[in-house]
Image: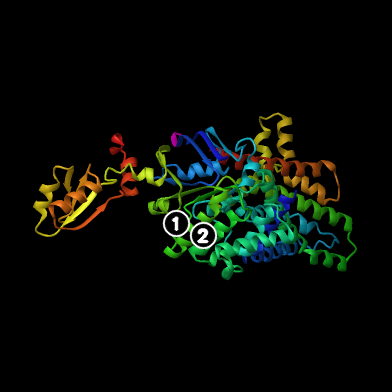
Amino acid sequence: MSLLIVLEKLSKSFGQFTAVDGIDLAVPKGEVLGFLGPNGAGKSTTMKMISGFLEPSSGSARVAGFDIAQSPVEVKRRIGYMPEGAPSYGEMTAATFLSFVAEIRGFRGAEKNRRIDETVDRVRLAEVFHQPIDTLSKGFKRRVGLAQAMLHDPEVLILDEPTDGLDPNQKHHVRGLIKEMARDKAIIISTHILEEVEAVCSRAVIIAQGRLLADGTPEELLARDPHHQALVITPVSGSEDQVRAALAAMGQIEAITGRDHQLRLTGASHKDVSAAIRDKNLQIEELYVERGTLDDVFRQITAPRESAHA
Amino acid sequence: MRNIFIIANREFRAYFSTPVAYVFLVIFLALTSAFAFYIGGFFTRGQADLVSFFSYHPWLYLALIPAISMRLWAEERNSGTIELLLTLPISTTEAVVGKFLAAWAFTGIALALTFPMWITVNVLGIPDNGVILTSYAGSLFMAGAFLAIGSCVSALTKNQVIAFIVAATVCFLFTMSGLDLVLNFFRGWAPEILIETIASFSFLTHFQAVTNGVIDLRDAIFFFSLIAFWLFANVVVVDMKKSA
């Protein structure tokens, strides 16, 4: 596995304010890395440094072997970057805009047209190809931004909130695109939508206050939820006490606030509990294993005070 | 070089993508002619030359050129497209020069469209067309210097109005520095060499030399080096904002 993105102690401060505080990170080919974090956590600033828009205050970023400070143009050749909000020149049409980007990326003549046609096809832009970008809907504008980043088939894609503001169908389509491209690229996306991480990312990091607080596959992050693998049991109405008494010995029982009758059992295995239910003939409506939610993990890791026990 | 051309081409088309360019051209042509005929006394002078036309160019440029240059960088910063531009595989210098050339070409078109003045004076008399040609060249170079100042100022802000006002002020100082109004302020106490230095920075002095038909290499060098200096400053400003 070749590492396409390597960050070492990457930091950025604006005056007194430290936006990114010593991030170390390595992203190999084939990985879709999700940047998770509250607003103002330093996700976008980190992306801007990798893409060469901001210079790091200290530390280094290397993309495909090139240092961003020493050979910025070489790095920029190998990156496709979609800034937050996918800005583009509103007065241009998608056609003229993509043609401009293609030319700057060094494509000419037939090769240029082939690249543009192919990309327009992939992001489904054909129907508005000749309209000024200003007149397009948010979804189409986002697709223009995506097309611009994908046009030269870069080794590294940096997408800042690629699905923000899209409707569910569009989101699904963009996620599909990202997954499709993942095989031979290293992709970093930032998002606050946690389900998105589960849907497209092979790995996720949680960033808050400029620091990297957690790093792992979505599954590993889920495992940090205290309720991960807990059992949720819904007794048949009237048999709550009986169920409670029977299971009390097997683990920690707590009531789930807001949901009547449901019990959460931690520290017991699914197998033992279902055996117990069968043997003792307990009347239950439902039994399932909780996966935990990334939302909970996220809150637990990034909430200022509660992070101590994480 | 190719990248400069691609950037300039995009930028140049951007001027014409809105009615602003056409409005500007009409205003430019109306004002240059109005000044030449009514204030400069093109007819009453009774001379077959375009001095009455060219001598108001520095003053017109003062108001009109910052209007062309103000959007160059401020608009990109305001709309966020600067992030796109500066993450494309080009150097900052290429972006700066490309944008400048587009604005300069646009000004060149505005200037070229004043050709009816030249036809008029040729119909009415027998002017020295060599002088007129050098005057046009001088006017274009002066416009370039104004534009370079404006472009650099535009990179400092995301507000086009601020870019306009600051650029106009800086240009005003450069224009005025040859006049007694400014020089008298220094005459009482400053050494002669300083006064001469200040006066030598005046657009007016250099431009008047050119419009008199004297092609002095020093005037050309003056405008060229001024353009080079301000574009260099422009690159520095753009790069500084990256590391801010």
Q: Position of residue A293 (x, y in %)?
A: 32, 49
The magenta segment is A15-19
Task: Kindly identify the residue that appears in the image at 90 percent across and 63 percent down.
Answer: B126
The answer to whether residue B131 shows anywhere in this view is yes
- Callouts 1 and 2 close, C-beta under 8 Å: yes
* Residue type indicated by callout 2: Arg
Chain letter of the residue carrying label 2: A
Q: Position of residue B87 (x, y in %)?
A: 60, 47
What's the CA distance linking mark 1 and mark 2? Answer: 9 Å
Find numbered disc 1 in the image and state the secondary structure of the residue it sits on: loop
- 10 Å crowding of disc 1: few (<14), some (14-19), many (20+): some
Q: Which residue is mark 1?
A: A164
The answer to whether residue B143 shows anywhere in this view is no
Does B8 appear in magenta? Answer: no
Task: Kindly identify the residue that appears in the image at 27 percent across and 42 percent down.
Answer: A226
Chain letter of the residue carrying label 1: A
Left or right, residue A164 beside residue A4? left
Q: Position of residue B227 (x, y in %)?
A: 72, 44
Find numbered disc 2 in the image and state the secondary structure of the residue it sits on: helix
Q: Which residue is mark 2?
A: A142
A36 and B160: which one is in front? A36
